[in-house]
Amino acid sequence: MTVAPEQDPVIRLRGIRTQFGSHVVHDGLDLDVYRGEILGVVGGSGTGKSVLLRAIAGLLRPAEGEIEVLGTNVREAGEAERAALERRWGVMFQDGALFSSLNVRENVEVPMRAVEGLDPALRRAMADLKISMSGLPYLAGDKYPSELSGGMRKRAGLARALALDPEIVFLDEPTAGLDPIGAADFDTLIRQLSDTMGLTVFLVTHDLDTLHAICDRIAVLAEKKVLVTGTMDEMLKVDHPWVHDYFHGPRARAALAAKDAQKEG
Ligand SMILES: Nc1ncnc2c1ncn2[C@@H]1O[C@H](COP(=O)(O)OP(=O)(O)OP(=O)(O)O)[C@@H](O)[C@H]1O
């Protein structure tokens, strides 16, 4: 998608400061994420990408700043308002973060249990739908996390993130640990889900192929803030040492060559 400048952000961050003891991770961080876009969040190791994801998703409270998601001020919202908001987003953690004692279907049903009055048979059918939308074979619903490959666990984590038909999904390094074909399949799946469901995707990644293949915009975390946002073409012109090295290094060149080859093929 192309982001129109006048578009309203579905996530709006202003002046975010997060710290652990005296270790300041973010300071004066601002960011807008627009409806329907896939935003890739990149930055060196330890720059606070996962911490930012957790802060927006309400899993961690910043020391300062304003977090507005879908028009609600997350930090000022009461319990009921927050619970209602949390149903409008889904989070997929790196390893899927599944409950090991539950099978995949039961894992996907966990967020649905918060919805009162949902018939168990309907819940089960909805979970099966999300499992198949995430590209898992139908029978995977009966399997336990320990019986799945890493890639399947990620897909199960995605199915759970999609359980309540969210408007926003937060994905923490979804392709980490996948083989290149599995990673490319996962990228395609995310793009398709975003296009068909109008999902907004906040995607933390180190994967340059993912950035090239599916991200509408990229946000670079450095110097405790979002240093720059823009399209891949814009990133290639940024004159900052880390950003330049990241987007022009040998891996970046290989990712660009792969994308060009795909276009020609
Ligand atoms: N619960 C916590 N307690 C103390 N420090 C933490 C906690 N969570 C994160 N940190 C610190 O915050 C900083 C940012 O961590 P974060 O996991 O967000 O980095 P990241 O950019 O996602 O890194 P990577 O790319 O390596 O996954 C790190 O220095 C980390 O040690």
Image (tube, rainbow, N blue to C red):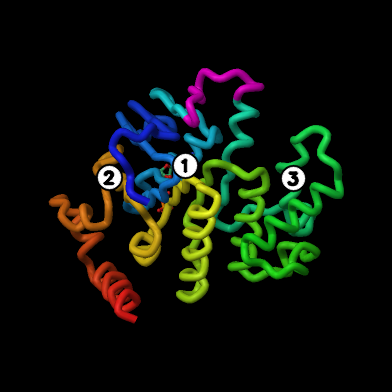
Residue in front for this viewpoint, 124 or 253: 124
- In the rendered structure, which amino acid carries the disc numbered 1? Leu
Asked which secondary structure carries label 2, the reply is strand
Q: Name the residue at 48% across, 76% down.
A: 181
Q: Earlier in the sequence, mark 2 or mark 1?
A: 1
Q: Is residue 64 above or below residue 33?
A: above
Q: Name the residue at 50% across, 53% down.
A: 194
Which residues, given as a range, are shown in magenta? 69-81
Q: The C terminus is located in which quarter? A: bottom left
Residue in front for this viewpoint, 35 or 168: 35
Say if disc 3 is inside 8 Å of ligand 1. Answer: no
* Residue that mark 3 sits on: 110
Question: Do the residues bearing badges 3 and 2 touch, measured as CB atoms within 8 Å?
Answer: no
* Image region (quadrant) for ligand 1: top left
Say if disc 2 is inside 8 Å of ligand 1. Answer: no
* Residue that mark 1 sits on: 53
* Residue that mark 2 sits on: 229
Q: Is residue 25 above or below residue 63?
A: below
Q: Residues within 10 Å of mark 1 (few under 14, many from 20)?
A: many
Asked which secondary structure carries label 3, the reply is loop
Q: CA distance from mark 3 to mark 2?
A: 35 Å
